[in-house]
Image (cartoon, helix red, strand yellow):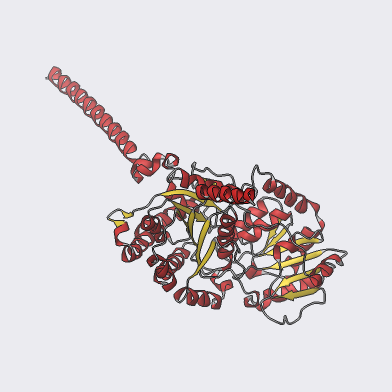
Amino acid sequence: MKSLYLLIVLLQMTCFGNCFNILVVFPMPAPSHFILGNALARGLTEAGHDVTMVSPYEDKNPPNNGKYSNIVLEGNTQAQSSAHRKINLFKFGKVNPFLNMKSMNYIGKSATNSTFASDNFKKLLESGKKFDLVIVELFVDAGLGVLACHYQTPLVVFSTLSSNYWVNSLVGNPSPSSYIPDLFLTYSSSMNMWQRFVNLLMYLAKDLNHRFSFLPTQIELARKHFPKCVDDNGLITNVSLVLLNAHESINDPVPYVPNMVNIGGYHVNPPKSLPKDLQEFCDSAKDGVVYFSMGSNLKPSDMSQDSKQALLSALGKLKQKVLWKWDEDHLPGKPENVRIAKWFPQQDILAHPNVKLFITHGGLLSTIETIYYGVPVLALPVYGDQRINSAKAVAGGYALSLSISELTEKDVSEALYELLNNPKYRENAKKRSAIMHDRKVKPMDLATYWIEYIIRHKGAPHLRVAALNLTWYQYYMVDILLLLLCIGASFLLTAYFIFRNLFCSRRTDSKLKKN
């Protein structure tokens, strides 16, 4: 008993030195965002930390060790989520990417404002609870970074995407428009001249929008609720670390400053046994299974009738069985080889050896999961980053992509035949999977290490690059270019006047001699 008591005391002392109070804020009313935030919060809890998770959703099965607490954003956030579900996103996907900026500004304003206005969140602020670190999901909600100032802690930013404009500017990360396409475009890293021109225009438009529309709105929201943490220069906060939901197996290689870390795939869990009926369905599929899901936000019933019919006709001709995640109880015209349900355990299905193909909208989580298990893809992108994810998958050789608004039975059938019968797509998917699994440490362990590192080193200011201390004209060497232009212009003017005087002097001498 005495030995057991000493062991308990030792463990408590160890925890006292290494366990931290961490606030995790994921305000976006989208299930996919909650999946990422909750996976990060639970992973930190399992590492021994006390975690407070703030989001519009509740973890129905929280860790039972007493170190995880859930603050559910109510009211406006839930209304926003409900309104989001009523939108036909298949129509929203047709919006010009340049016009998307206005929509993203509105989404960010709503997320930031509804978080600050939430009664449950206000109770947390008024509780006096202290934190050692604040982690904020940065998805057009930069104003939430003010929480690090309020709690006097370092700030870790989580990007649900790869490196992008919203996070690059916070840590001075370079992002050349010559080979890094914007997230809302459909280009690969090998852009032609016209694509590079369009990409440059997108970069410039986003920069102007960020400086003169998005950021001022976010700063005003932060000033309204935390006036002491906003001065004339904006939010009083420094980003110590950026965690990216990205990895070399999925994304193109791009430059990262020292305080940016890839942890893509951390949310993927070891596969579990399928429910008995699904297990029998997949096991008995001698020709294989095609899994079809459009993610957690899109409602496949909102597709146009032509697109539905094209898919139904093409899928009905397959010898493979099909699992289709469908949002209604019935699917008119459903072929016999197709089984529908409102929910499927996606990761566990993709892990089954009989699954031959994944038909997906190209969402990042689905892309990560299909690469993790090495399953080729037929992508039907609709909006947002789905298009560029699909373009990268096609460039990676493990996918084909079709326009959801222009589907025909012929196109779908040809794509399905190619993907199911040409082994190169599965081979390339397996190669990508091998890259994803070839890591020194698990991605969640990597995230935990860096979060603890930031706390231990008081925000790790030694990782900040000097670019953050420069103005935009200094960063882009505009002042140097102007100086060189001035010197060059002065040299040319001086040369002009010298030659002019010489020429005039000779003409004068010539006239005098003639006279």
Q: Is residue 507 at least partly visible in the picture?
A: yes
Expressed as whole percent of the image width and height from the top left, the position of residue 169 reads 43, 50
Is 364 or 411 nearer to us in this picture?
364
Q: Residue at x 34, y 53 (%)?
A: 236
Q: Residue at x 44, y 71 (%)?
A: 120
What is the residue that sits farthest to the top in this orientation? 513
Is 309 or 446 nearer to us in this picture?
446
Expressed as whole percent of the image width and height from the top left, the position of residue 475 reads 38, 41
Q: Quadrant of the C terminus?
A: top left
Up-down: is 364 above or below 174? below
Q: Is residue 191 at least partly visible in the picture?
A: no
**Residue 193 appears left or right of 397:** left
Expressed as whole percent of the image width and height from the top left, the position of residue 334 reads 77, 78
**Residue 236 appears left or right of 302:** left
Find residue 92 and report its image quarter: bottom right
Query: How many numbered marks appear?
Result: 0
Q: Residue at x 59, y 66 (%)?
A: 62
Is 164 or 452 nearer to us in this picture?
452
Up-down: is 146 above or below 294? above
**Residue 408 appears left or right of 92:** right
Expressed as whole percent of the image width and height from the top left, the position of residue 45 reads 57, 57
What is the residue that sits farthest to the front in this orientation? 2
